[in-house]
Amino acid sequence: MSPTPFSSSPSVALNTGLQMPLLGLGTYKLCGLQDVYRAVDAALCAGYRAFDSAAVYRNEAELGKALRALLPKYGLTREDVFITSKLGPKDQGEKAMEGALHSWSQLDLDYIDLYLIHWPGTQGLPVGDERNPGNRAQSWASLEELHGQGKLRNIGVSNYTPAHMRALMQSCKVPPAVLQVEFHPRLCQPELMSLCKQYGVCFQAYSSLGKGELLSDPVMLDVAKNCERTPAQVLLRWALQQGVPVLPKSSNPERIQRNAEVFDFTLSDTDMDRLSALDCGQRFCWDPSEVA
């Protein structure tokens, strides 16, 4: 089977004009070169062309090494993959430039395709601290500068609320290309989705499986049974059918392969509605709503 560059795999156009694959491998909890290498190898083999890391995952260097070693195996080059990383909350504010450059250096892949502010707050400050908005603005200015230098091809944010997004859009020189947030049938985030559409920002999902909790939901199991797919595939397809890119994470090669098999079937309107009706505002990850 010939390799597929992300330019010819399912992707979305960002507001920079660059393309981002709709399917990426989340690398949260992948630790050590051996585990990262194994997962990246399985993902490239399965057709993944995007990889999502972060400073706080402590695997940026390992991801970079794995990609440099494995891309030639699949006849791919640096330009054929899309790499995301994120600024750690400890570097929010005046340390943002240093933190972003550290990510860039650790990955050692010439440039980062997408770099996000990981969290709207600052490590060590109370969530309601009034210094948080200023720190976010300072971080964004640093990302804008590195974007101008070409080190960060796209910049964006993660875990921002509607209020955080509005404030950013009013003050930024370069608009965010992506907002990455928790998104699944129990947390549909309609206000954020609408804002992103209004601003021309790509809305991207993490935790599509609800930390695994949604895999045993009775409605999910019924839909999966009816379309002869796994619950994970159904959850990923539910997001993709709304134009939302996904980042399933796994270290299991078989699961990595199965999670990629989401572009050859369609959920019916009825099944989409049944899943969306599960929305109850339930979060399985962090809640940014209290961050000033």
Image: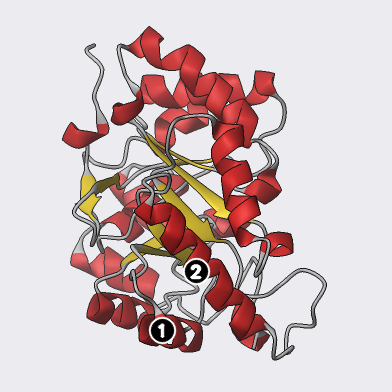
Q: Nearer the viewer, residue 71 or 222?
A: 71
Q: Please identify the quarter of the rendering in which residue 57 is found.
A: top right
Q: Which mark is residue 140?
A: 2
Which residue does the image show at 20% across and 35% down from the upper left?
7
Q: Are marks 1 and 2 in contact (CB under 8 Å)?
A: yes
- On the image, numbered disc 1 is attached to which residue? 171
N-terminal-most mark, 1 or 2: 2
The kind of residue on which mark 2 rests is Trp
Q: Please identify the quarter of the rendering in which residue 214 is found.
A: bottom right
Residue 9 to residue 101: above or below? above
**Residue 100: x %, y % from top left:** 58, 51
Q: Nearer the viewer, residue 234 or 86?
A: 86
Which residue does the image show at 68% across and 61% down from the upper left?
95
Which residue does the image show at 31% across and 18% down from the upper left?
76
* Helix, strand or loop status at disc 1: helix
Which residue does the image show at 32% across and 60% down from the upper left?
244
Q: Residues within 10 Å of mark 2 (few under 14, many from 20)?
A: many
Residue found at the far right of this picture: 124
**Residue 194: x %, y % from top left:** 30, 82
Q: Residues within 10 Å of mark 1 (few under 14, many from 20)?
A: few
**Residue 238: x %, y % from top left:** 33, 59
- Here the colouring is secondary structure
**Residue 14: x %, y % from top left:** 25, 57
46 lies left or right of 211? left
